[in-house]
Structures are given as C-alpha cells and as structure tokens.
Amino acid sequence: MDLAIVGLGKIAQDQHLPAVGGSAAFSLAAIVDQRAVDTHVPVFGSVEALVASGFAGAVAICTPPAARFNIARVAIEAGLHTLLEKPPGLNTSEVDQLTDLARRKGVTLFAAWHSREAAMVGPAKEHLAGRQVHDVVISWREDIRRWHPGQDWILDEGGFGVFDPGINAFSILTEIIPGAHRVESCLLEIPEGRASPIAAQVVMRLANGSSATADLDFTETGNQTWEICVRTDAEELVLADGGSRLTIGDKSVPPLPGPGEYPRLYERFAHLIDSGQSDADSAPLALVADAFRVARRERVAPFEF
C-alpha cells in the first residue's frame, strides 16, 4: 500500500522513514511538508494538495500535536487509512471525533503508541496478569537538548512539554496494568516565557486502589532514565530503557528477538487495515489531560535551547 508521511521532522526522519523503508506492507509514495527537499518521492505542501492529487492508501501524521486533528480529519474524509504519531491529539475529544469519523468512512485509525511496542512490554504485561500490584514508581528523565534540539514547539502552547516523552511512560503503564487509573495531584514546573512544563511530578491512583508516581524531567544531562518499577505481592518488576530491558526480582529476562518499535507499529497498522479495524486508545492521553487539569503550576528559570 502506498503511504504518505505528513510532517518530515526529526521523528519522521529517525524512525518512520526507516520503518517504512523496511516494511513489506507499505511503500513510501509521498511526503507532505513544505520544507522537504530531495526526498525522491513527490512532495506536497498540504494534505489537501495530497488528496487533490488522487493519492490513495495511507498516511502517517508526524506533525506537532496541535496540527494533527485537522490534518487527520481531511485524510479520513478522503478515505485514507491514518496513523497518528503520539500523542494522537491535544485531548481525548479530538481522538473520539476522529474515531467516529473513521468508523463512518470505513477506514482504519491507529494511535501509534510506539513505547508499547518495546521488546519487553509484552512479557511484563503477561507476568503482571493476575498479580496484585502494590505500587508503581516511574522515572522518565532525559535531556531535551539532546533528543529535541531546537524544537521550541514542545514548550509552546499545545506542545505537551515534558509530557511529550512522559506520555510514553503512561502508554506503557496503561498497557501493562489495564484499568481506569486517575491522577490525584500534579506539580508542573514551567519556565518563564514558556507555556508548557519542563518537569512534572504526578501522583496517580491505579484502578485497584494502589498508588503510582511519575517523576518527569526534561533537564537530565547525566544518565538518561526511562524506567518503570512495579512492586507486586511476589517481587519487584523493573522495565528499563523505555521498555527494552526487564528485570523480575533479581533476574534479568532475556530479550525477545524481533523488529524494533516502529517496524512493529507498521506491522500492527497493516494488520488493522487488513482486518478492517481501528485502534485509537486514548488512555495515556487522558492521564496527561487529568494531570494538566489538577496541576499546581510553578514558574522556574527561563529555558533556551
């Protein structure tokens, strides 16, 4: 199936292009980005121009979050299967509207939570099934200058700030421990002159009544940490390196062979299209929305890239 990538930014270049290039299900047929040059495929300045060209197939929307809803709406109206880079929208209402539109148009909508495709997330979920979870501690600390160089939009209104990576942790949490979790309190640290947080402390109550905390920080210049620690009635389980390493008790679980996160996403997207289904889970986005809603905000020192 022909596929167009909408928004040729860092994540598209680093992850989507290689994944599509190695896919047996999709072939890169177009780019939608006014800045794109030397792509070896047709380039369009807007999704409307792409649709007007007669393009048929699928799109992967990799723009900043604030632009995704309107682009996805146009694509779905035109009958294009649609993959949304995370987060799938600014709020759950946007995702709900797109889900309903995709159902009426008979196309697939896929909210691509790439961290759920990390190698050891599945084994962690399987291990936790049926076990009593006592508490969860999330530490998601990374250097914004290293991973998002010059991307001011992340700290702008609608850019999600530290929740841009932090929502990856929430996507894993809601995958390995299903249920209706809720946010009890949140502290956001927002740099002077910016609209979105550079750090956050989140306290949650899981569906079974146990607690979960998340320490999210965009200013970590030392060791980068993407870790979820789950304490159960039997032992402690630790998912590290964004879900690629798993330790249960004092034993490391050997990693499973297979493709990386983004190749797995495109395999999943192809399967959904073949089966006529959608998967637009908005549970991680709901936790972020709740965090913003209940948050206490503190202004901190200005931040520049």
Image: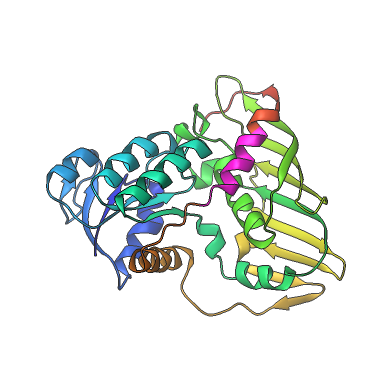
Would you say 215 lies left or right of 122 here?
right
The reply to whether residue 150 is visible in this rendering is no
For the N terminus, which image quadrant?
bottom left
Report x, y in % for residue 284: 59, 47
Q: How many marks?
A: 0
Q: Which residues are magenta?
A: 281-291
What residue do we see at 48% from left, 43% from top?
148
Q: Is residue 286 magenta?
A: yes
Q: Is residue 205 magenta?
A: no
Most distant residue in the left direction: 53
Magenta span: chief secondary structure: helix
Report x, y in % for residue 233: 87, 67
What residue do we see at 73% from left, 34% from top?
186
Most distant residue in the right direction: 233
Would you say 278 lies left or right of 193 here?
left
Quarter of image, res 151? top left
Q: Nearer the viewer, residue 182 or 123?
A: 182
Report x, y in % for residue 59: 30, 52
What residue do we see at 69% from left, 49% from top?
180
Quarter of image, res 51? top left
